[in-house]
Image: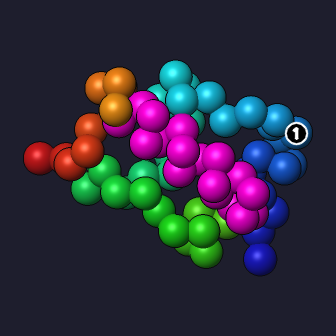
Amino acid sequence: MKQCHFCTGNVKHVDYKDTELLKRFMNPHARMVGRRRSSVCAKHQRKLSLAIKRARFLGLLPYVAR
């Protein structure tokens, strides 16, 4: 199993304004990728999902891809 991207990078806060980072954890249909597929630990997956939801609400990321 791979290591968590955020734990290995020593990232304390997942920023909702960093859309390029958030897009890495979304599939082409603009849906969030699951924990097992993205190899992120549970703690950071919760922070990641919250950041994606905030970015969607502010219009930085799409809800659905066309």
Q: Is residue 44 magenta?
A: yes
Total tally of numbered discs in the picture:
1
Report the amino acid beneath label 1.
Asn
Residue 16's image quarter?
A: top right
Q: Residue at x 84, y 50 (%)?
A: 7
The image shows residue 58 at horizontal and vertical percentages of 35, 24
Please state the extent of the stretch shown in magenta in the rendering.
40-56
Q: The N terminus is located in which quarter?
A: bottom right
* Left or right: 49, with 32 as reference point: right
User: At 34% across and 32% down in the image, what residue appears?
Assistant: 57
In the image: residue 59, left or right of residue 41: left
Camera-side residue: 6 or 2? 6
Look at the image and say whether residue 51 sits in the magenta stretch.
yes
Rendered residue at 88%/39% (across/down): 10
Residue of label 1: 10
Q: From the top left corner, tell me how far across and down residue 37 is, in percent.
A: 56, 71
Res. 23 in view = no
When the figure is inspected, residue 30 is found, relative to residue 11, above or below; the finding is below
Seen in the picture, residue 26 relative to 19 is either above or below; the reply is below
Secondary structure mostly taken by the magenta-highlighted segment of the chain: helix
